[in-house]
Every structure is written in structure tokens, then in C-alpha cells.
Image (tube, rainbow, N blue to C red):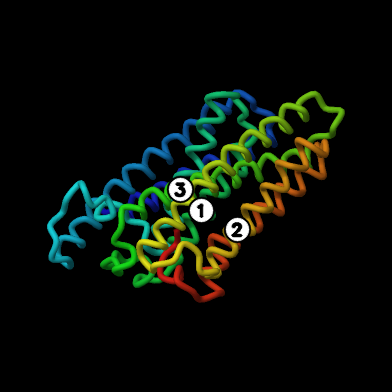
Amino acid sequence: MTSNFLFSLTTGNYLIAFLLFLAATVFKRDSWNRWIVGWLGLGWILNTVGFGLRIVEFSETMQKSHPEPLSWTRLYQYFPVTNLYESLVLFAWTVVLVFLFLYWQRRLVEIATLTSLLATAALTYASLLSAPQAAIVPLVPALKSNWLLFHVITCFLAYAAFGVAATMAVIYLVRLSQKNPIALQFDQLIYRVILFGFFLLTIGVVLGAVWANESWGSYWSWDPKETWSLITWFVYAGYLHATRTRGWIGKPAAILVLVGFAVTLFCYLGVNLVLSGLHSYGEG
């Protein structure tokens, strides 16, 4: 059994969760909610096991291609997020993780539909990549740093938080109005999720600067990825400022959340696919 096979099963589970939610909505079967969350949870477990297998496969490749022996002091030897394929797998994993945490806290099954769709889209995109793009390759020298682990994890948890917040914003715009008692709950929850993501993005940007100085001798070089990370940071800083000091709630705030996620997606995917720079070989 390979990690790619498990990721295929994961995609199927996430897709089933999405279809179950659509069916439950059409046939008004609230009792199906536990099955929806169950399928998402099972998909996340498969996603986790698959990523664990990828770690084993990656470590074996590292051992064969690098003269240095494996060591727990060199964590980058065990963290396979060095190409687009692996980053999409990690993105799907973090998105569902954030959803499961929110469901555990608030039992908001409504956000399962777009969350499962977002995770399914990420893994489907990964499965459509060519074999060379999905292959495990030796690390380039700049990526051989433990900062890789901490920078990428914080950034992707931030991306996931922004993605889940965007799904809530869509639900708000489509199904709720400011007079709906659930609307205030969504407003507050979106704010808290964005605040969590903003905190992690800030840490991720700082860690990335430290890593850049270690690798390239400069904390900031206005590389396209760095520039768009800063733009993303300012967009969400603007959202937090507008909601707390300007009283933005409801539809204007929800629209700004969607704009922020569009910028996030360009920072994550667009920069690597369209622009060239120091981050062109990696997806962190």
C-alpha cells in the first residue's frame, strides 16, 4: 500500500461527505449529520495515515540520496512538503482538521459541505498532477532546514483557517440575514477563526524571514511569495480592524473574508504557478 493509494481513498471519503450533505439538505434529513461528520472524520484519518506513509517514503528517499544519516535533530528529513502535490495533501488535511475542531466546539455541521468540497478539490487537483510533479525528490540545499517544518505548518494552518472562514462567509451570504439569530453567531465565529489564522500567519511570516536569512542571507528580499504573503497579512489585518473599530458586520465583512481567501489562494497557488522567484520550487 502506498501513500498515493490512501490519498485516493481520502478523496473519495471527502467527496462522499459532500454528497451526503447535499442529500441531507434536499431530503431534510438532519439525522444524517453524524454520518456526514463521520465520513469527514474517516477521510481525515486516512489523510493522516497516508501522510504518515509519505513521511516513511520521503525519509527512505532522503536516506538514499543524501550522504547525511537520518536524525531527529534534522526534522526536515521527515517532512514531505517540498512540492505542489504534497502541499495540496497537507492543505486538505489542515482544512478538515480546523473543521473538526470547530464541530467539536460548536456542532456547526452546516460548514461541512463547503469544507469537504474544498478538501476534495485540493486532493483532486493533486491527483491530476503529472507523475514527476507528484514524485518524491531530494531536497534542494535551501530547504534543508528545520525552519521548513515550523514555517510551513503555521502557514498552512493559517490557510486552512482562512478557508473554513470563507466557507462560513459563503453560507452567511447565501442563507442568512442580519435579522437571523444565527447570523450573529456566524459573525463572531468567523472573526475568531480569522483571528486564529492571522496569528498563525504572522508567526509563519516571521519564521519565513528567519529561514530566509539563514538560507539566503537576507530577512526580506521582496520575492513574489514574500510580497503576496505581506499583502495577505494586510488584507486580514484590515478585516480585523474593520470589524473591531469600524463595526463591520454582516455582508460587508463576509465579502471581505472572501476577498481575503482569494488573495490567500493566489499567495499559495498563483504565485508558484504564475510567477517565478525563490519559492518556485516549494509550496510553503
Numbered disc 2: secondary structure: helix
Answer with left or right where residue 184 lies relative to residue 106. right
Tell me where residue 64 sits by quadrant.
Answer: bottom left
Q: Residues within 10 Å of mark 2 (few under 14, many from 20)?
A: some
| Vertical position of residue 132 compared to residue 145: above or below | below
**Quarter of the image that includes the C terminus:** bottom left
Spatial separation of the CA atoms under disc 3 and disc 1: 34 Å
Is residue 18 visible to the viewer in this orientation of the structure?
no
Q: Earlier in the sequence, mark 2 or mark 3?
A: 3
Q: Residue furthest right?
A: 179
Give x and y (percent) for residue 121. Answer: 54, 55
- For label 1, the residue is 205
Answer with left or right where residue 47 lies relative to residue 190. left
- For label 2, the residue is 230
What amino acid type is highlighted by mark number 3?
Gly
Give x and y (percent) for residue 15. Answer: 52, 46
Q: Residues within 10 Å of mark 3 (few under 14, many from 20)?
A: some
Q: Tell me whether circle 2 and circle 1 mark residues in contact (CB < 8 Å).
A: yes
- For label 3, the residue is 12
Q: Residue at x 36, y 55 (%)?
A: 148
- Front-lying residue, 218 or 60: 218
Q: Earlier in the sequence, mark 3 or mark 1?
A: 3
Q: Residue at x 80, y 23 (%)?
A: 181
Tell me where residue 32 sits by quadrant.
Answer: top right
| Vertical position of residue 55 compared to residue 180: above or below | below
Answer with left or right where residue 180 lies relative to residue 8. right
What amino acid type is highlighted by mark number 1?
Val
Spatial separation of the CA atoms under disc 2 and disc 1: 8 Å
Mark closer to the observer (2, 3): 2
What amino acid type is highlighted by mark number 2?
Leu
